[in-house]
Amino acid sequence: MDDQQSSIDAILSSMTRVAVVGVSADPSRPSNEVAAYLLRQDFKVSLVNPRLQNLFGFHCFPDLRSLPEPVEIAVVFRRSDQAGAVVDQAIAIGAKAVWLQEGVVDEAAAARAREAGIHVVMDRCILKEHARRAAVGASSA
């Protein structure tokens, strides 16, 4: 099993407090779909977007440092050139994992997170990975 798959397994088997960074109010955007999915799956979701006040009936926060409660996973929907700043915030707040969504890659930021003892997933979709894991679990039951 590779390091990334090991991190995916560790994250999805034990972590439930998630911040979706870069969530969009547009239902056609992947960040909106993923946030809605995570809420339906009973994750405790914090929404992060400095341009939104509320989404799905929940308050939106301007950044990770503004969250009133700790999060375990920072799910990053920002361009690769902006992901490093979010990863640095995740390190600063003591997140246990950073999950850079499909198309988001920042090797330097990933290295900083790993050095801080944080699980890192890059260029993968948390919704797809969670759904795949749930389907495998259902088929083996």
Image: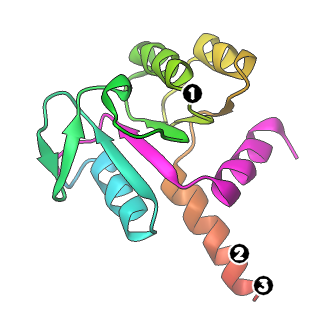
Q: Which numbered disc flags the more N-terminal residue, 1 or 2?
A: 1
Check whether the beta carbons of the residues at disc 2 and disc 3 lie within 8 A of each other. Answer: yes
Q: Which numbered disc flags the more N-terminal residue, 1 or 3?
A: 1
**Residue bearing the label numbered 3:** 140
Residue range highlighted in magenta: 1-26
Q: Which mark is residue 109?
A: none
Rendering coords of residue 140 (x, y %): 78, 84
Residue depicted at x 41% and y 41%:
19
**Residue bearing the label numbered 1:** 94
**Residue bearing the label numbered 2:** 136
Nearest the eye: 59 or 111: 59
Q: Give the Cα separation between the discs numbered 1 and 3.
A: 35 Å
Which tag is nearer the camera, tag 1 or tag 2? 1
Label 3's element? loop
For residue 129, above or below residue 121: below
Please say whether residue 13 is one of the residues in the magenta stretch. yes
